[in-house]
Image (cartoon, rainbow, N blue to C red):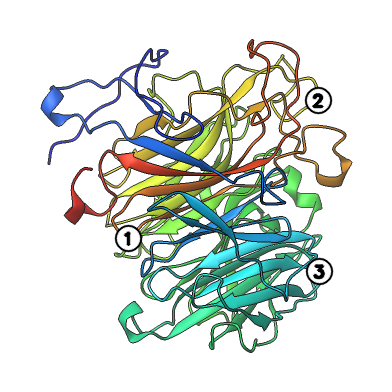
Amino acid sequence: MGFWRPSRRRLATGLAAALTLLGSAAVAAPHHGPASLRPPAPTFASYPIPGSLGSANNSGEPSVGVDWRSGAVLYQAGFATYRLKLTDGTWTDVSSPYTGFNIDPILVTDPWSGVTLAGGDDGSCSILAVTTDDGDNWQPSLPCSFTPDHPTVGIGPAVGTSRQANKRVVYFCQQYPWVNECAASTDDGTTWLPAVPVQGGCIGPSGHVKVSADGTAYLPIRACNDDGSEASLTSGAHVGGAVSLDNGRTWNSYRIPGAVWPTHGFDPSVATTPDNTVYESWPRYGDYLPMVASSKDHTKTWSRPVDISHGSGFPIYASTFETVVAGDDGRVAVAYLGADRPPEPGTTVFDPGYVGAWYLYASYTYDAGAHWVTTRIQQAPVQLGPICDVGTRCLSGRNLLDFMDASLTSDGRLVVGYANGCAGGCPADPAAVAQSVNAWGVVAVQKSGMSLFGRFGSF
């Protein structure tokens, strides 16, 4: 198949109809080259959580997973776990009786087996529950670590096995304040081994842990340095993470050359392809544009970081909440929020007083990052004003919390779980001084465009 080269940045005028409920649309960025070589523009349908479900507008930092056996989408935010049936767009509250109150919600679904862990942390331990039938039945799971904050859960094949062997490892990681720890389970969360610390120079909040086809586990971390101390973050720190090659018994740090630690923003994100290439995305230091680099040797060496929004045709001046998914070798998508105007000099888009609108985007590559095509998933903004990144010190702009999430259907369609800060209506003029206060849960599902699994072609 031929590929394409994106044009210079200019505002796309264009297209695509509303597809469901929220009127979600996708606008194709312009491209050079013959029309026969252009990828079809992905379009999306949006499925907002109905207001009859109690936490519909309390859905900051959602996690999302897809069970490939049933096609169900599982969505976790706040104290609730919801199930979306894509065949008819219906939502059901399937929250576990074991989870209840939690500080930080989290969920992961193994798409091949349908095993889902959902819940959240309650200090150093996490109140999780496990289901194998999309939330109809649950069993409690209580992983613990000495670190009490910002949990992530991942699941994948054990080292030396394959997904077909049906032998999995579940990982539970937390951090606080400058220590990261991970526990592992070999029985789908029924019992857990003691948590072990990440060694090396990576410290602080992490993104979601992911597991590659060969069993390597990756924990992306925003700040990595030579000695692991808070003091040295001001000089020489880079984006990186932790990697485990032995089913979570040990974790060692890695740094991405050229990826200077962004002093503002949120977690990086990783995903892996079947050939065990790992892709990591984060906001670039200084301008916070969405970056991606890849490694083919378990993080020993990395490709040069690239700005995936460059040449997109959209006014993207900063990004946040990057979340990466991967299909076949070389096929990767990154969903993120993009700010439509720069901040005032000396400030950032995360600071109080930022005036601008944030839109939901997805950038795709089908040739291992040589070229990217970017789509605006929803025509309306999903946030006005800053997205505050200083946690409990935020006085406003904290409605979306810390991240969003993405997954894939069994035929390679991108699924994005996010919170819509403008669900209750935002000013018609995005330049108005305004601050979103809503956090309405939404799942956006790709309806057309190229699949991330080559055998399905285009929809």
The reply to whether residue 302 is in sight is no
Q: Secondary structure at mark 3?
A: loop
Q: Which residue is mark 3?
A: 122
How far apart are labels 1 and 3 at the CA level?
A: 33 Å
Q: Where in the figure is residue 93, as x and y percent of width and height?
A: 62, 60
Give, as a three-letter code, the residue at label 2: Pro
Pointer 1 or 2: first along the chain: 2
**CB atoms at circles 2 and 3 under 8 Å apart?**
no
* Quadrant assignment for the N terminus: top left
Quote the CA–CA distance across marks 1 and 2: 41 Å
- Judge whether 290 appears above or below 203 on screen: above
- Reply above or below: 188 against 419: below
Q: Answer few, some or many: residues within 10 Å of disc 1's Cα (few below 14, many 20 plus, some between 14 and 19).
A: some
> What amino acid does circle 1 point to?
Ser
* Quarter assignment of residue 215: bottom left
Q: Which residue is mark 1?
A: 410
Type of amino acid under label 3:
Asp
Image quarter in which the C terminus is found: top left
Q: Nearer the viewer, residue 427 or 108?
A: 427
Tell me where residue 107 appears, x and y as whole percent. 60, 64
- Residue 321: where, in percent of width, then height? 59, 42
Q: Residue at x 40, y 13 (%)?
A: 10
Q: Residues within 10 Å of mark 3 (few under 14, many from 20)?
A: some
Tell me the residue that label 2 is attached to: 352
Q: Position of residue 65 (x, y in %)?
A: 49, 60
Q: Residues within 10 Å of mark 2 (few under 14, many from 20)?
A: some
